[in-house]
Image (tube, rainbow, N blue to C red):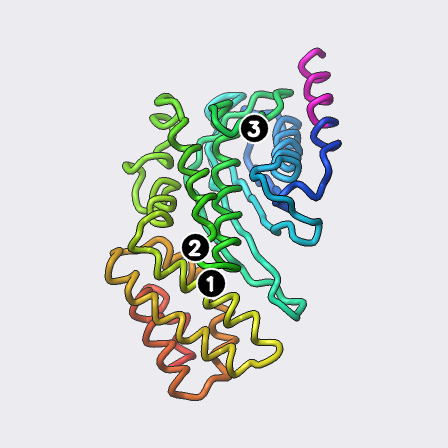
Amino acid sequence: MRNQFLLLISLLFLASIPVQAQELRATVTVNAPQLTIIDRKVINEFETVVTDYLNNTRFTDEVYEQEERIDCNFTFTISSETNEREFTAELLIQASRPVYGSDYSTTLINYLDKPAKIQYEQFQPIEFAQNSYTSSLSSLLTFYANIIIGVDKDSFAPMSGEPFYREAENVVNLLPSGVTSNDNGWTNSGGQRTRFRLLQELLNPRARPYRQMSYDYHRKGLDLMESDPVAGRTVMAQSIEKLRDVHSDIPNSLLINIFTASKSQELIEVFSASPPTERKAVYQVLSTVDPAKLNTFRTLR
C-alpha cells in the first residue's frame, strides 16, 4: 500500500506542473499479445506511468506553449519476458511537426529500436534527474526525449539540436556498466541500428550536411509549400543533394535510413508534381543513398 500511495503522490505532483513547461505530447502504446509471466495490470500501469513521465517531465530549460509541444509516439511491442519486472521489446519512436500555413504534419523521425531491455517495478514512479542515474527506464525515455527535441530543433534552425544531443550523450555516460552489459542498444557492439549508433551519427561532424539538410528541407522548403509550392519544392530538391555527402562520408548511414523511412511517401507526393528533370534528379539521389528502397522511389523516375 505504501508504494501505491507514493506512486499516487508522484503522479499528482507531476500533474500539478504547468503544462506549458513540457516539451512533448506523447502517446504511449504497449502491445503485449502473449504475456505468460507479467500480469496484464502491470503492463497497463506501465503504459500509464510512461505516458505521464513523457508528458509531465520538463527535459529542458525552455518553455513550450501547449501548441508548441512535439507530437510523438512511443510504441512498445513485447517480444519476451525475463521475469515479473523485466521484458524485451521493440520500441518504435515517431515524432512529427506541423508544416507552416497548413494542417499537415511531417514526420521527423520514424525509428525502430530493437531489442530494448525494459525493467519496470510495479508502483515505482519513474524519476527524472538530469545529472545522475535513476533507472534504466528513465534513461531510455530521457534519451529519446532529447533526441526528439533535438531533431525537432534542427528542423527549425541550423544545428540547434546540438545541446539536446549532448544531453542524450550525458544520459549514456551516466549509465552503470550493469545496464550497458544487459542491453547492447547502449553500446557499439549492438549492431548497426542501436541508440549508440544513432547518437554517434547525430554528433558526428560528417553528419552536419544531414542536419543542415533537415533545416533546409523543412524550414526553407516544406514550410514554403503552402504559399509557393514551386519554390518550396526547388529548395527541398536542392537540400536532398546533401545526402550524397553523408552517404559518401558515413557508409550505411543510419540517419539516411531514418530519413527515407520517415519521408518516402511525402517525397513521392511532393515530387510527383515536379518537372521531369527535377523529379529524376531527386530519384537519382534517393536511389543512390538508399538503394534498398529503389522500388519505393521508382515512380519518380
> With respect to residue 173, does 273 lie above or below?
below
Q: Earlier in the sequence, mark 3 or mark 1?
A: 3
Relative image position of residue 239 (x, y in whole percent)? 40, 70
Give the crowd class for mark 3: few <14, some 14-19, many >=20 residues within 10 Å.
Answer: some
Query: Disc 2, disc 3: CB below 8 Å?
Result: no
Q: Is residue 27 visible?
A: no
For discs 3 and 1, the disc positioned in front in the rendered view: 1
Q: Earlier in the sequence, mark 2 or mark 3?
A: 3
Compute the Cα span from label 2 to label 3. 26 Å
Question: Disc 2 residue type?
Answer: Met
Which of 268/15 is in front? 15
Q: Residue at x 26, y 55 (%)?
A: 250
Residue 102 part of the magenta-drawn span: no
Residue position marked by numbered label 1 in the rendering: 215
Q: Quadrant of residue 246?
A: bottom left
Question: Disc 1 residue type?
Answer: Tyr
Residue position marked by numbered label 3 in the rendering: 128
Q: Earlier in the sequence, mark 1 or mark 2?
A: 2
Relative image position of residue 270 (x, y in whole percent)? 51, 76
> With respect to residue 38, does 51 lie above or below?
below
Q: Is residue 170 visible?
A: yes
Compute the Cα span from label 1 to label 2. 8 Å
Image: magenta residue range? 1-11
Q: Which disc number belongs to residue 159?
A: 2
Question: Disc 3 residue type?
Answer: Phe
Compute the Cα span from label 3 to label 1. 30 Å
For discs 2 and 3, the disc positioned in front in the rendered view: 2
